[in-house]
Image: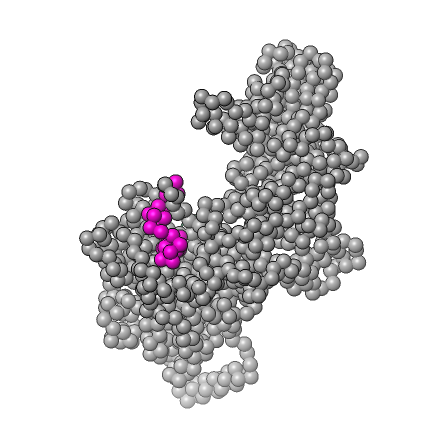
Amino acid sequence: MINTVNIEKKEIYGSRSHSGSPSGNGNGDKVGESLQSVFELALESQGPERTAQLLEKLVGQLRSTPRPPSGQTTPYLNTIPPENQPPYPGDWRVERRIKSLMRWNAMAMVVKANSTTNVGGHISTYASAATLYEIGFNHFFRGASENFPGDQIYFQGHAAPGMYARAFLEGRLDEKHLQNFRQELAEGGGLSSYPHPYLMPDFWQFPTVSMGLGPIMSLYQARFNRYLHARGLTNWKDEPKVWAFLGDGESDEVDTLGAITLGARENLDNLIWVINCNLQRLDGPVRGNGKIIQELEGLFRGAGWNVIKVIWGSEWDDLFARDKKGLLLKRMDECVDGEFQKYCVEPGSYTREHFFGKYPELLELVNHLSDEQIRKLLRGGHDTKKVYTAYKAAVEHKGQPTVILAKTVKGYGLGEAGEGKNISHQQKKMNEKELREFRERFEIPISDDVIAETPFYRPPVDSVEIKYLLERRKALGGFLPARIVKPATLDVPKLDSFAEFFKGSAMEASTTMAFVRLMTILLRHKGISKNIVPIIPDEARTFGLDALFREIGIYSSKGQLYDPVDSSSLLYYHEAKDGQILEEGITEAGSMASFIASGTSYATHGVPTIPFYIYYSMFGPQRVGDLFWLAGDIRAKGFLLGATSGRTTLNGEGLQHQDGHSLLHASTIPTCLPYDPAFGYELAVIVADGLRRMYVENEDIFYYISLYNENHAMPPMPAGVEDGILKGLYKFKSAAEGKKVKAHIFGSGPIIQSALKAQEILAERYDVSADVWSATSYKLLRTDAIRCQRWNMMHPTDAPKKSYVENLLAKEQGAFVAVSDNIRTVPDQIAPWVPGGLFTLGTDGFGRSDTRTRLRRFFEVDAESTVIGTLYALSEKGLIDREVVAKAIKGLGVDPEKIQPELV
Ligand SMILES: Cc1ncc(C[n+]2csc(CCOP(=O)(O)OP(=O)(O)O)c2C)c(N)n1
Ligand SMILES: [Mg+2]
């Protein structure tokens, strides 16, 4: 019997990296037959009662025996058995000393900052992950070199102090930097709280601190690397690996797990996730009543990933080897994470009694260990050799992405100050006693008299530690993290490439159609055609971009393994290994991750690409706003096209689709330029200038452009308006002079048509000359005005500066009215700088399904409402009689008591 157990156990240990599902075979059948005969024999010779007893005994024995994985999980053991561990290539003693110094400095940085300020910071995350990072830095993470862009590493945001501590030992940061952790405005600058490329553009590559975004970005980054290579845009010799470090609590974010099947589908063996399973998040256990490692294992295996569990440290190997009955494993399986946490904080005697003590044989198993030794039985994520083994297996694994589930202790080494405690995450201070204990535990050469000041410690450059550390990084290609940007410009098309837009067209068209035409021109422009990355979340047909399928192909790492149903048609669904379109399917988050990967390829690969991500505008910032924000932080470039925009223009789709506020969302992102063009020529001028600013001038900005699906006249471009288009406002059509009063209507997008019609009605019926202006960007007008206003505030005795919009409108008379298919707050952004104020009409409230005509009356943005609004604004200024407004309301057939869109 004992032999059988051993054989089974060996099988389990040895059969990790495949699914291991027990399949029927000839031997199995034979065993079954034999068992049947034994059963019959027992029945015959012993009788039913005795046979039942025997069977019960056997079942009991089976329960406590390690079994091969059932379903998607394997036993609570390290995936790689000790006998398969490779020799450790480094000097682990020196590495341990280096790591201890990192631990100290990372902790000191936070404690010091919080001794005089309340800037916060985290000690426990890095404390639990130090080994996970150090093995990577010393043996795996490759820096950039010629023909190699460097491995791309997503560091867990809260572990940032550890990365700074390393950079300090490497000599890349000095004491002053560390002193100013989280004090970026201090004299001489400081270190940002988390990875923010916007704030530390030479250091951090990937923002990660908003949980879930690092994981999804890393997935799409790994796929984007393949895409770039398949399209011949890279010349690397070795493929970079993408490593993402995340927390086990972070796995609850939908963004973390929602896209993992992509990794398996695309065979992304260039992707490795390391999940730091310290079993804790901010408030307490991640799964007190369950096992997060097992849960994640099941999920990732189900999604087709290679899963490597690193649960136990080397000290456990001997215990498992001597545990012939599998009782230890049984006990592991019984315990929930809440209990494992308890064993972390209690003394060894507690673990002896409550964990091992459950079964006498287990107690015996640890008889030779003192309580202290039991307390020191390590979790795998703190064991250098176990972590190295897992990483090596991960980088060598072929055909699948790998996830390493590393079990650790949150706040490892903090002792009483917060090791494994529920408060660990928030711990930012340590008293002198705790500092001394920490120092002793990690053997930091800091004396008693200064310890209370938590001084930073860096050994001399010629010390064994620093020499080792620098040698390792040199061998691996240089320091990390590092964001390296070499200036690269593209030969972007000049304005005259878009001449056809400037002539206007006899045919009515929408701005979406204009965009499709524009894309065709760009995709044929030899300077940039290769660099363009069209990204679509399953909406190409909606926007009329399906013609591109055939022309430039949809990227597929597998090519096209089937004959598409529409292969006989001209515009068939064409997938190709070097396809240019990223057809992401229905995932706005994934598409944004692709946008970001493409928009930052100038930095990650030294190859500028130009993403054009077109989507339903309602599912942009409203749906995945945090990724939009991150696009700013990461210094992404490119064009976001919010199509089917406008609360009334997208008429039939109703409340969840009709967008009248994305422009406002986009306005909140500092590096985003939002535009709301009305005509094809405006779009062309905006895109041409965007290409110049981003890909010639190398500005780290991106564009948000609303596109609409309503066809209307596409007029020729009036002379000299380019500057106004780009700045945000220009006079599109002056009114006939000679009327009694003067007014101005700012229109945007298709709603400029309401303004134009209102212009006619006002002239014909109410003796008002209303000029129509095209307002292409309220945000840009506002930021320019704010800049001037601020300058004036700071220089009160100098001649005041005037903003573009103030200068533009200085000489204009009468009332000013704005009308758009967006909420009123969008135009209201410039109200303080409009002479005499701005009266705004807009689409505040929920959308609903109906015809455009009815919706525009409902929201009061149609021509009649625009007339009434203009007359009202004039009456408010005393320029016309209120009676005129009342008559117009009647004369234009507008019901003044009609229901109003909901405003709370
Ligand atoms: C989207 C988002 N929500 C909440 C937070 C706040 N937060 C920061 S760290 C943290 C807990 C992290 O736990 P875990 O992922 O397990 O990381 P650990 O520190 O344990 O390694 C939380 C809730 C955040 N940063 N991002
Ligand atoms: Mg955690």
Residue at 57% from the left image edge and 66% from the top image edge: 237
- The stretch in magenta equals 159-186
Q: Nearer the viewer, residue 829 or 488?
A: 488
Residue 51, visible in the rendered structure: no
Residue at 75% from the left image edge and 32% from the top image edge: 715
Question: In the rendering, at what x and y percent does residue 407 appear?
Answer: 38, 63
Above or below residue 600? Residue 474 is below
Above or below residue 191? Residue 75 is below
Question: In the rendering, at what x and y percent does residue 321 appear?
Answer: 35, 78
Question: In the rendering, at what x and y percent does residue 141 appear?
Answer: 46, 63
Q: Quadrant of the N terminus?
A: bottom left
Residue at 71% from the left image edge and 51% from the top image edge: 526
The answer to whether residue 133 is left or right of residue 654 is: left
Task: Please check the rendered image and state whether residue 869 is part of the magenta-colored stretch, yes or no.
Answer: no
Residue at 50% from the left image edge and 68% from the top image edge: 395
Q: Nearer the viewer, residue 316 or 235?
A: 235
Q: Nearer the viewer, residue 34 or 667?
A: 667
Question: In the rendering, at what x and y percent does residue 744 appear?
Answer: 65, 21
Colour scheme employed for the rendering of this structure: one colour
Above or below residue 36? Residue 652 is above
The answer to whether residue 412 is left or right of residue 713 is: left
**Can you tell which quarter of the image residue 133 is in?**
bottom left
Residue 8, visible in the rendered structure: yes
Total numbered badges shown on the rendered structure: 0
The residue at the far front in this view is 462
